[in-house]
Amino acid sequence: IEGTATDGDEKLSALEAASTAIRNDTIANDGARVIVDVIKIEGASAPVGIPVTSLPASPSVSACTAAFAGVLDGRTVEFSAGNAAISDETMPIAAALGAIALLCDRHGIEIGAHTDARGAESFNQRLSQTRANTIRDYLIDLGVASSSLSAVGYGESQPIDTSQTTAAYARNRRIEFGVGNAEPVP
């Protein structure tokens, strides 16, 4: 769904109206696997779905890797504290990632989930695996081939910031995507 809105409220209303129209239209609903947000807000950063629009019908590994990186640039899929439920606020990010995965699943995709170092290491390992599985299941529900997806929980083993600050903890809690033989993209 693309267009321009003057503010966040107008954008949300437009997304809800367009999504409802698609879901209520039998033909459109049959063809729509995922609805991607490409609505711009005047004067704001690019919408989450812009990297999806740059992908060709049969994207290369590098194009897929760049698209995942573009969606995740400055964004992350958030989960409820201590569990694996994708937060409602980050569902547009998950939808954009799903659209990329639908176009890129012929290459094989690794979903890597990471936690921060707070809590027991064994708990963090299980939590990260559960979160990776949640993303994998979400993508499969969208129609991504399950055989092309792997879900790996890294727990707290690969921090990108070893500081013990709230900001560092937030950076370390992340989902990454690796395409083909490429390294995962945070």
Image (cartoon, helix red, strand yellow):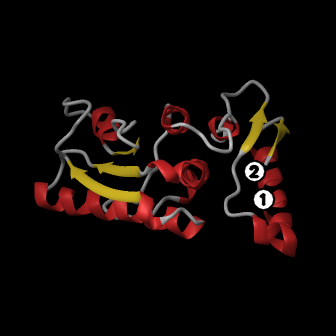
What amino acid type should be assigned to the residue bearing mark 1?
Glu
Q: Nearer the viewer, residue 139 or 38?
A: 139
**Quick check: 132 above or below 159?**
below
State how many labels appear: 2
> 52 left or right of 89?
right
> Of helix, strand and loop, which one carries label 2?
helix
| Mark 2 and mark 1: Cα distance apart in space | 6 Å
Q: Which mark is residue 145?
A: none
Q: Are the residues tagged 2 and 1 within 8 Å (C-beta)?
A: yes
Q: Which mark is residue 16?
A: 1
Residue 122 in sight: yes
* Crowd rating for badge 2 (residues with CA inside 10 Å; few <14, some 14–19, many 20+): some
Residue drawn at the location 51% of the way across and 67% of the way down: 140
Name the residue carrying label 2: 12
Residue drawn at the location 20% of the way across and 29% of the way down: 163
> 37 left or right of 177?
right
What amino acid type should be assigned to the residue bearing mark 2?
Leu
Where does residue 105 sit, x and y in percent of width and height? 51, 53
Residue 25 in sight: no
Where does residue 70 sit, x and y in percent of width and height? 55, 33
Where does residue 97 sit, x and y in percent of width and height? 55, 49
Residue drawn at the location 78% of the way across and 37% of the way down: 7
Residue drawn at the location 24% of the way across and 45% of the way down: 116
